[in-house]
Amino acid sequence: MTGYVLGRLAQAAVVMLVMSALVFLGVYAIGNPIDVLISPDATQDIRAAAIAAYGLDKPLWEQYFTFLGRILSGDLGRSFVYGMPVSELLLGRLPATLELTLTAIVGATIVGVPLGIYAGWRPHTTFSKLLMGFSILGFSVPTFWIGLVLIFVFAVELGWLPAGGRGATLHLFGADWSFLTVDGLKHMFLPALNLSLFKFAMMIRLARSGTRETMGTDTVKFARAAGLSEWTVLSRHVLRLISIPIVTVFGLELGATLAFAVVTETIFSWPGLGKLVIESITALDRPVMVAYLVIVSFVFIGINLAVDLSYAALDPRLRKGGGR
Amino acid sequence: MRDTPTGRFLAEFAENRVAAFAAVVVVAILLLAIFAPLFAPQDPYDLASLTLRDARRPPGWVGSTGIHHLLGTDSQGRDLLSAILYGLRISLEMGLAAGALAFVIGALLGTGAAYAGGRIEALVMRIVDLQLSFPAILLAFVLAALLGQGRGPLITALVAAQYAYFARTAHGAAASERQKDYVEAALSVPLAAPRVVLRHILPNCLPPLIVVATVQIAAAVSLEATLSFLGVGLPPTEPSLGMLISNGFQYLLSGRYWISIYPGVALIILIVAINLVGDQLRDQLNPRLKR
């Protein structure tokens, strides 16, 4: 078990290194940021001074190692555009993305799983068929277009909810949060709904197929034979049996939602990480791009590692030797 | 016709009314896209025929040049129906090109790895698995952003994001084929390894790959639209459906819904229809679900 854990840790470290190098190289290839930073009629001296100040005159490998060293010490460089440390910039935007993605994924799970269990419990009712049809739509229709429709219907036509922005925020634990104010919640509703639809469809499908499989097992037969009500069977036994894949997907989707947030945040002008990275790509703000991409890759590698390790803890074949 | 394998396959497919209808829709859209110049009331790229007097007019507007704009016009006075037909063309080209390329690369990689076995197999499949754990949208987005706008970069980004699905499927199918006697027989003839892989193993892996292909083409079209919407896909000179939707976004807030909504409807009809066809193909090609 220890060997397996160490192996996986080493593997994750190698992957992180490779990812950071790829991202750094890729970003370096994307045009010269100095053209964006300095007006074309600046003197040669000003240009040279700016290039030296940002370290753009050094060879590529040297820039990469400086970058790697700085990352390890928690320094992600300074944004060309904002002129402030990238770590500060990213941390400032993180709460907005965090509350949006968490609301979306928790909401999708809380609503989607019971509906999916129902669809698996009574697969042939009209409602279940409607649910499955809806989940196909949720998978097929691109997120950004649903976002547009939501804005058009609820913000433009009905005027019930705002079309973008974060609304009023409340300062707590050193960050601003929208979910603590009524205005903020109003602003969060549409983007969170938009972001959650894909997960919602997935949770319905997952819960449904799990429930359908479980309904035929001895566990359910015996529970029914013991005279338990259908409600008790579903909520006490079925839910528990199908929860393992759901929890796994919940964890993995946390990272995927972060990626999808790029789209939703752009549409709803939600000032989170995703909107920041889109802006930094158009502005060729290299340090911000690199830092965002590296951090997101790391989050993913971390999540995968956690999933692998928790499987190792759950799977007796891998647990052998390290168990109770 | 019913007695040939193809005939039986088609008959079984047609039994599912929804899938049959979806297949008809897909074919119709393909024809509309291929023959767009014949169906479109206007050539949307012919700037001389556009006039700003007709800009942002609602559906049903009769333009100053006498064209009946069934779906309205965009911000440059372009007939939206024509723009959608030409946009479908670009979206489908990108989706099909990326899907085909990802299919070939993934299939070769998957079957090749299954045939080679040992360390090569472990390494290739480890990379594929690693990539599958990242969401395709993130990978495509990062690559498209790094490579810049254009057809080449976009297709590269889509293929890089999607080949892994084909590789995983091909590997799964090929690994079980590899164990079968006919492969041993072919190898002992002896036939060259590439020939065995391409002529004998690969054809037997095609059914699951075809299912993946339909789903992935739909996904590629959707991804392309998303990337173009975000401004990292195709340049504005090649308005795919995603670009059309993006162009209309700013007018959506003032209630001019048609510029964004109708290209989106076209996109969704296309994606949902392809997915429905894919669902039915999966049911038919999966031997475990056979009645």
Image (cartoon, coloured by chain):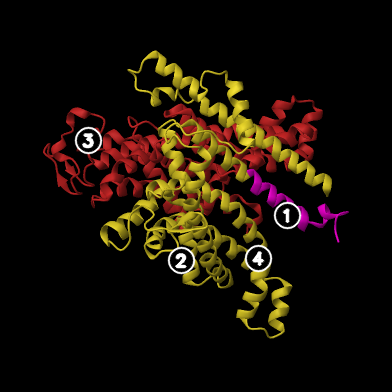
Residue A123 image offset from top left, x and y in percent? 55, 69
Residue in the picture at 38% in, 52% down: A147
Q: Which residues are magenta?
A: A301-324
Pointer 1 or 4: first along the chain: 4
Task: Identify the residue position indicated by label 3 in the image.
Answer: B42
| Secondary structure type for disc 3 | loop
Label 1 close to label 3 by CB (< 8 Å): no
Q: Chain of mark 1?
A: A
What distance separates the C-alpha of mark 3 from that of mark 2?
Answer: 39 Å
Does residue A142 appear in the picture of this structure? no
Task: Identify the residue position indicated by label 1 in the image.
Answer: A310
Task: Identify the residue position indicated by label 2 in the image.
Answer: A130
Residue in the picture at 61% in, 22% down: A61
Front residue (pair A80, A193)? A80
Q: Is residue A189 left or right of residue B44?
A: right
Q: Amino acid at mark 4?
A: Ile
Tell me, yes or no, whether dots 3 and 2 are on the same chain.
no
What distance separates the C-alpha of mark 1 from that of mark 3?
Answer: 59 Å
Q: Chain of mark 2?
A: A
Residue in the picture at 56% in, 32% down: A23
Q: Colour of chain A?
A: yellow
